[in-house]
Amino acid sequence: MLTMTNVKKIFRTDLVETHALKDFSLQVNEGEFVAVTGPSGSGKTTFLNIAGLLETFESGQYMLDGNDVSQLSDNARSKIRNQKIGFIFQGFNLLPDLNLFDNVDVPLRYRGWSASERKQRIEHALETVGLASRQKHLPSQLSGGQQQRVAIARALAGEPRFLLADEPTGNLDSKMAHSVMELLQDINQRGTTIVMVTHDPSLAAEAGRNIFVRDGQVSELHEVNTFADVVNG
Amino acid sequence: MNWEIGPIFRAVMRNKVGAVLIALQVAVTMTIIVNAIFIINERKELLARESGIDEANTFYLSSSGFGDNYNAQVTVEEDLANLRQIPGVINATQTNAIPISGGGWSMGLKTEPGVENEGVGVAVYFTDQHGLQTYDVELLAGRNFTDADITWRDPVKGDWPQMTILTQAMAKDLFPDLPYQDVVGKTVFINDDEPIQIIGIIDKLHAPWIGWDGLERVMLVPQHLLFDSYRYLIRTEPGQLDRLMPEIEALLADSNRNRIIRNMNSMTDTRERTYRGHSAMVSMLTIIIVVLTIVTALGIVGLVSFSVNRRRKQIGTRRALGATRFAVMRYFLVENFMITSVGVLLGAAMTVGLNIWLVNSFEMQRIDWYYIPIGMLCLWLIGLLAVYGPARKAASIPPALATRTV
Ligand SMILES: Nc1ncnc2c1ncn2[C@@H]1O[C@H](COP(=O)(O)OP(=O)(O)OP(=O)(O)O)[C@@H](O)[C@H]1O
Ligand SMILES: [Mg+2]
């Protein structure tokens, strides 16, 4: 599904060069639920951005769904983001001026689907996250957990193969965090590949596989309990 | 392709203040600009009107006699004879009034005698058989005056001669149903019941008053003036005017010491002076249009830039969700087009409103309908041009902004 080989990402500002990813290599298979952890500044978000085609990289290779995506045009990348990838953000990133229905509709509109098809998908997606009755509400009228559910509905409505989440529970209390986690697990059960960045070891433990990122590189862990050891020492 | 019209509209409706301000600004700008352009065009039409005379090569001056030794009749006869034989002078005539100048005489002519009948107002130019050539007018029908027709007008009694030459426009206003050829030979009445026969029709000659609605109505009267003060109108060959003006002024002054020559003016200067207000109005309105257009365009640039900066994260999110750069640009263009459209529709109503008020208060013309759609198009275009820069900036916001907590 996703194969990165020796991906290198450097951020350049006037004063410093940050090597955010150094020879980053990773394979994620179809249907996996991968949790990415690691210290702050280790390159987790950078990895996710590159995986989601939000950012380009200096060198290395990235195969998504069997295609080399490193040389694509901006438009082609937009199209892949739109059709194959669903995003869930830490800050939910709902559009505050649009009601829930219109929010979920945003990526679907770029798909060129008919209004009736979009409507059906939006309603279904909102139903999946348990917010079917709130279509006309504005994001500001919902709790954080509910907002993140809307964001998940938005990510799901286009039926992407691949869901990327950067600290999706970072702004939620633990009860809400776990219910969002349950939702993601449901989605994963139904076949969507998920890569999720999290700081929370107990959530990471619920994923199928854990990846630990340190200093722009991957160290892969299969045992949940060893993960805690690494973090602690 | 999906233009997101519904969501954009609903989003605008949730942030009305900025949108309403811009729409109002567009409406006011359109109202003022369209009316201003209409006024400018009206004035330009006024400025473009030709008086009928050979303005570039014609000038005039006034002669005022004084003292016991002054003999008006002799002076006029001598002056005209002198003027007409100066090389470079095409012809000259004594007259009471000058086209465009603003000063002149008017009378009323009636087709039926009697106080009770309506007259048609007409500007009076006293002249002789040399008038046609001096005024550079063409005789369309009938005949010119002859030497025998010319009489001397007594300043006190002021008798009217029994013949006149009219402009085509005057003939039409007196006898709307007759072709001008058939007006020749007709008798009309001046001072209610004094008959005058129309002996000729000329093509075009303007009355002295540019704002008069009877501007084209002129009668030529075959009389020399025995007044103390009168004017000579002098037409020169092309290119001779500048040289001849001072020469002729000096010649007339020297030829007779019992009068003074004053107020010498070229027709070009006279036109410039008379139309100065109109020219100034055109310049002022042009400046207003330019300034307003710039202010409105900058207002739109400002509002859109502000909203782009405020929505950076949202734009990044849209990009992350699959919006192309073009889709982001289109978003802002569509959003602004909606706001401008409200302004432009309101502006169309306000434009007509302002025009109606101007028509009622200042006797302006009713605006031609096509000014409205053209004005709407222009403001739409200004709106799109103004929003283009900020929209491009929005389109360059990277999708990675969605995940960055800035
Ligand atoms: N746009 C950028 N410009 C410059 N440096 C950047 C940029 N984005 C990230 N970096 C740097 O790259 C490195 C990796 O950042 P990244 O955001 O990927 O870390 P992270 O693992 O997601 O951290 P956190 O857990 O705090 O979210 C950091 O040193 C960061 O400062
Ligand atoms: Mg991060």
Image (cartoon, rainbow, N blue to C red):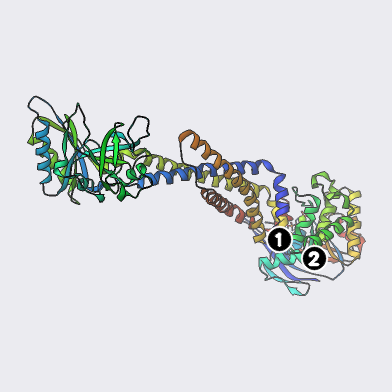
Q: Secondary structure at mark 1?
A: loop
Where residue A199 appears, as percent x and y from the top left, is 84, 54
Where residue B45 appears, as percent x and y from the top left, is 39, 46
Query: In this image, A112 relative to B169: left or right?
Result: right
The amino acid on which the numbered mark 2 sits, given as a three-letter code, is Val
Label of residue B21 in the image: none
Q: Label 2 lies in what chain?
A: A
Label of residue A218 in the image: 2
Badge 2 local density, few (<14 within 10 Å), some, or many (20+)? many
For the image, the number of numbered tags is 2
User: Which quadrant of the figure contains the N terminus of chain B?
Assistant: bottom right
Where residue B99 appears, as percent x and y from the top left, is 28, 40
Q: Label 1 lies in what chain?
A: B
- Quarter of the picture for ligand 2? bottom right
Query: In this image, B336 relative to B276: left or right?
Result: right
Quarter of the view holding residue A22: bottom right
Badge 1 local density, few (<14 within 10 Å), some, or many (20+)? few
Label of residue B2 in the image: 1
Question: Can I make out residue A42 in this image?
Answer: no
Question: Can I make out residue A80 in this image?
Answer: yes
Q: Are marks 1 and 2 on the same chain?
A: no
Q: CA distance from mark 1 to mark 2?
A: 41 Å
* Residue sitting nearer the eye, B230 or A84: B230
The amino acid on which the numbered mark 1 sits, given as a three-letter code, is Asn
Q: Is residue B109 above or below residue A184?
A: above
* Residue sitting nearer the eye, B55 or B178: B178
